[in-house]
Amino acid sequence: QGDHEDILVGIEEIKGELSKYEHPYFIIDLMYWDRHTPKEKRKLALQLNQSYGLIRDYLWGERLVLTWLNKRAESSMHFPLQRITGFRGPTHKFLAENGIIEATLLDLWAEEDIRPEELTSRAFIIGGIVDKTGDKKGATPRIGEKLQENGIRVKRRRISLRGDTVGVPDRINLILEILLKMIFEGKNMEEAVLEVQ
Ligand code: SAM
């Protein structure tokens, strides 16, 4: 009986170790790339550049995915695109091709905060959106709808500071950094937000 329990505990430990190697994809959805002004595109490209640096600090470049890439968007990037995963099609197609049917969309309009137990998601999606003109309000939920229309189960989750998104930076690279700190450094949401502010 005792041996049997030891074996079961051992199996659980091995499973825990293995799951550490199933790293998630961090997807930046560029569906709205062409809706940006030239100045917004420059800012977006800068935030993507910073996201590339971050992913290499925590994981490796290939885990950062840019979807909806086209020639125009590619020519604006200032980092080696061959070191990340560039995908020319829609996000749902990337997920389907990788056998992922459920993903977490980081969405400032969501009603629920992301919970610690949800950090095991296989894919986190951040909207590749920069707002300077105010015509992209609510664009992130639209990304979620598009995924759902195409058969992906989407969990829309928010990052908040004491229950409010005011005080949470909305730059793509900072949202990514908050997530990485929560997943790989075990920080809680408040600690992670305060550290990137
Ligand atoms: N105007 C856009 C909208 O209304 O959806 C805002 C986009 S925001 C500048 C860029 C991306 O950062 C969003 O698509 C979302 O993925 C992420 N984001 C920003 N703030 C967030 C928050 N508080 N919680 C979760 N995700 C957030």
Image (spheres, rainbow, N blue to C red):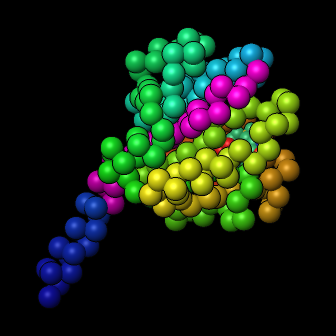
Q: Measuring 51% from the left and 31% from the top, which residue is drawn there?
A: 68
- Above or below residue 134? Residue 74 is above
Residue 181, percent across and down?
59, 45
Q: Nearer the viewer, residue 193 or 35?
A: 35
149 vs 137, left or right, is left
Asked whether residue 99 appears in the rendered view, the answer is: yes
Picture quadrant where residue 8 is located: bottom left
- Above or below residue 123? Residue 129 is above
Q: Measuring 59% from the left and 52% from the top, which residue is drawn there?
A: 144
Q: In the displayed orientation, state which residue is furthest to the bottom.
A: 1
Q: Measuring 52% from the left and 56% from the top, which residue is drawn there?
A: 149
Q: Measuring 70% from the left and 20% from the top, which residue is drawn there?
A: 41
Q: Nearer the viewer, residue 9 or 19?
A: 19
Picture quadrant where residue 189 is located: bottom right
The verdict on residue 30 being magenta is: yes
Where are the magenta residues, as a range? 16-37
- Above or below residue 49? Residue 6 is below
The verdict on residue 194 being magenta is: no
- Above or below residue 177? Residue 165 is below
Q: Quadrant of ligand 1?
A: top right
Residue 29, percent across and down?
57, 37
Q: Where the N terminus falls, by quadrant?
A: bottom left
Asked whether residue 43 appears in the rendered view, the answer is: no
Residue 88, percent across and down?
44, 28
Q: Where the C terminus falls, by quadrant?
A: top right
162 vs 6, left or right, is right
